[in-house]
Image (spheres, rainbow, N blue to C red):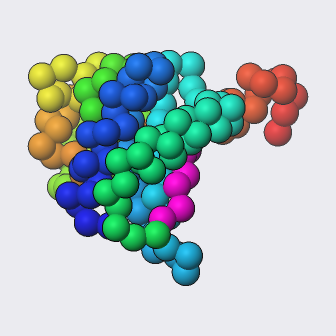
Amino acid sequence: MDKKTIEKIAEIVEPILAAKNFDLVDIETKPSPEGNILTIYIDKDGGVTLKDCEDVIIVLSAVLDTYDFIDENYILEVSSPGLYRELKKEKDFKRYLGYRIKVKLYEPIQTNSFGKQKVLIGKLGDYSNNILKVVLDNNEVVNIDMKSVAKVNLEPDITSLLKNNYGENYG
């Protein structure tokens, strides 16, 4: 699917998702023998459930069939962006304040504690005016201009998550 088609899909589905309190995170296509796999990633406050994905795919499938502008076979999927989701929009950064993140930079930057680093892991301290504030594990605060950032993902501490859910004796 070309970029123009994906943009049109986004234009159609975004207001429908917003009316149901979901955010459109991303649209991705991958080739498959049966046709392109069209995956629409959604999110909402509190996270996305399997039931949410089921409900949304029914609505979006009907809507896309009604518009009938996609000129090739495709398989529609609706998914959450997952544990390691990429943060792209300002709303993403605001939603995940305080969460652990991984920041990949185009060029290394100097930190007080770890020297020059091209990848930083810490908590998302703040985001405003295109400046990302990352609180490293040793509490050093690093302010990064988003122009320097290649990618930001959530980076959950799985051991802590498991201990929180299954008790301190886990692991």
Where is residue 27 shown, x and y percent of the image? 38, 50
**Part of the protein shown in magenta:** 74-83
Quadrant of the image containing the N terminus: bottom left
Specify the quadrant of the image occupied by residue 33.
bottom right
Q: Nearer the viewer, residue 126 or 70?
A: 70
Q: Main secondary structure of the magenta part?
A: strand
Q: Is residue 103 visible?
A: no
Q: Is residue 60 visible?
A: yes
- Does the magenta run of residues contain 56? no
Q: Nearer the viewer, residue 156 or 121?
A: 156
Q: Relative to 79, does residue 141 appear above or below in the rendering?
A: above
Residue depicted at x 29% and y 19%? 126
Residue depicted at x 48% and y 65%? 74
Q: Nearer the viewer, residue 22 or 62?
A: 62
Where is residue 157 shown, x and y percent of the image? 60, 36
Q: Relative to 110, does residue 68 appear above or below in the rendering?
A: below
